[in-house]
Amino acid sequence: MKENPKHIRIDEYNYALPDERIAKFPLPVRDQSKLLIYRHGEIIEDGFASLPTYLPEGSLMVFNNTKVIQARMHFHKDTGALIEIFCLEPILPNDYVLNFQQTEQASWLCMIGNLKKWKEGSLKREMTVKGCPITLTATRGECHGTSHWVDFRWNNPSVTFADILEVFGELPIPPYLNRDTEESDKETYQTVYSKIKGSVAAPTAGLHFTPNVLEALCTKGIDLEELTLHVGAGTFRPVKSEEIEGHEMHTEYISVPRTLIKKLIKHDGQAIAVGTTSVRTLESLYHIGATLAACPEATEEQLHVRQWQAYEPFEEIRPVVALQKILGYLDRHGMEALHSSTQIIIAPGYKYRIVKAMVTNFHQPQSTLLLLVSAFVKGDWKRIYDYALDHDFRFLSYGDSSLLIP
């Protein structure tokens, strides 16, 4: 009988990670990082620049082209208290692109640092944007779990919210780096192919790629395609419950172009995913297609992939059929891209449908990302991580990476 992942104990996914093994800064040259290759149970190591030699010619490789926004803002109250506002996701309007284009006002769901010092009233900050002096105000609204609705207003209609973040915002590097953001992070904490603004964390497996590696992949005859998943702050949230049933996955917004759906069908519904964000998006596509197979007239809300949906009974279909259902949905609605959202949790007991190989970094102990890796390598994660720790691999966002082929 299939294992019920809800009762997995997160302490079984723990390992000792000394602080000195966490890479605080990236290497000067991205593709000079180390690459662990796990192939059918065998483990070897090489340099990341050699990645193309380990991939089969003619395969499809999928990247997440999201761009990290400068989502962290600091305000001082009249009392001198420092309040940090961390923009998580847009509310009004709730579309990222439209929100960034807003002039004069925009609303976001935010985490607030030093909340107890901001009981009431608006926060203000004077700044110069595009040569114009403006006053930005932030007004706190209702509470949503650990986050708050925040209304931003500014007094210049020629300035967009994207302009304000560009000038006033700070890039939110991961909390486990235990350091302040530096100017260099603005470049090194973005992938070289980042395009679509919206993430508050980088899809870090992509940080190793350089134009040279991308060119070498093309030369090898590997098809390169992109999708977008905006990474939320929940990606850093530790699992605090003993069993993962008690952990609520955050919702992430995805956009998958028609061209990628067609490429996936051409490649028999199989892909190599760069990063866990691409993994979650590609696997969510299967479950969106399964929903459409059961209910062709499903609404956008019904296409949202719920946390435990993959483990509930449903009629199994081939990945290509699921993708064809999505293509039909796009045709019926005259859409060039699928816009949806996912809360999928991939844990041991999950059956992968589309992802056949993945490039991923080394993740935090007791994290949902470690569960995802374990599910992919059929529980063999400990041997991989022991090898990485014994062979001086660097861990987490700015660390080294692995190529996993089960």
Image (spheres, rainbow, N blue to C red):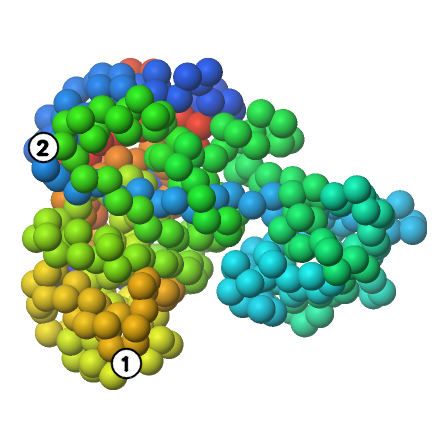
Q: Please indicate, yes or no, whether residue 320 appears anywhere in the rendered image.
A: yes
Distance, label 2 to label 1, CA atoms, is 37 Å
Q: What residue type is disc 2 on? A: Glu
Res 41 → quadrant = top left
Judged left or right of residue 88, residue 11 is left
Residue occupied by mark 2: 57
Q: Position of residue 221 (x, y in %)?
A: 13, 32
Residue ID at (82%, 51%): 134
Residue ID at (63%, 27%): 183
Circle nearer the N terminus (2, 1): 2
Q: Nearer the viewer, residue 79 or 192?
A: 192
Q: What residue type is disc 1 on? A: Ala
Between marks 2 and 1 in the image, the one whose residue lies nearer the viewer: 2
Residue occupied by mark 1: 298
Dot 2, crowdedness within 10 Å: few (<14), some or many (≥20)?
A: some
Could you tell me which quadrant the N terminus lies in?
A: bottom left
Residue 60, compared with residue 198, is above or below; it is: above
Could you tell me which quadrant the C terminus lies in?
A: top left
Q: Please indicate, yes or no, whether residue 378 appears anywhere in the rendered image.
A: no
Return the mark for residue 272: none
Q: Secondary structure at mark 1?
A: loop
Q: Position of residue 226 (x, y in %)?
A: 31, 46
Residue ID at (35%, 16%): 32
Residue 40, compared with residue 89, is above or below; it is: above
Judged left or right of residue 401, residue 94 is right
Residue ID at (60%, 58%): 101
